[in-house]
Image (cartoon, grey):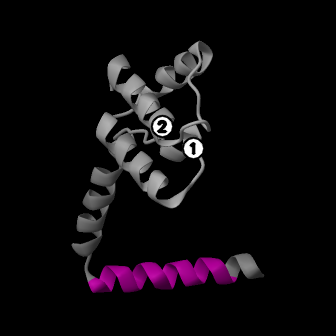
Amino acid sequence: MNYEEAVEVLKTIEEVYVGKFSLTKRKVALWTTELEKMKYDPVMRRLTNHVVKSPFPPTLSEIAVYEVSDNGMAEKMARWKKEAAEVSEETKRMFLEKLDEMERKMDK
């Protein structure tokens, strides 16, 4: 989100929690720095859920929604699952037998 959206989040908290959440220059600087790393809509949804449930203003961590970076792991897992499905039952059986044999040797 941009700076103006981050400030809008803070103003919303201040307006909903009158007398319980006051904006200071320091608070605005700290919160906006973190809020700008997030997307506006998911943060506002978390804020709305918080308002419905709590009479107390949220902490930043209670409304924070950081994006999860895609490191390609989901694609790798899907590829491995597909490859595993293509392995014959005979190969799987032989693998398990060899694995059992190795475990027995290690237990001695």
| Quarter holding residue 6 | top left
As drawn, 4 above or below 67: above
The mark that comes first in sequence, 2 or 1, is: 2
The reply to whether discs 2 and 1 touch (Cβ–Cβ < 8 Å) is yes
Q: Position of residue 86 (x, y in %)?
A: 21, 72
**Image side of residue 78 versus residue 44, left or right:** left
Q: Position of residue 47 (x, y in %)?
A: 43, 46
Residue at 43% across, 78% down = 95
Q: Provide the secondary structure element on which disc 2 rests.
A: helix
Q: Residue at x 33, y 58 (%)?
A: 77
Question: What residue is shown with label 1?
Answer: 57
* Position above or below: 96 against 75: below
The residue that mark 2 highlights is 13
Question: What's under tag 1, amino acid-wise?
Answer: Pro
Label 2, residues with CA under 10 Å away: few <14, some 14-19, many ≥20 = many
- Tell me the quadrant of the picture where the N terminus can be found: top left
Residue furthest right as drawn: 108
- Front-most of 102 and 11? 11
Instruction: State whether residue 29 appears in this view.
Output: yes
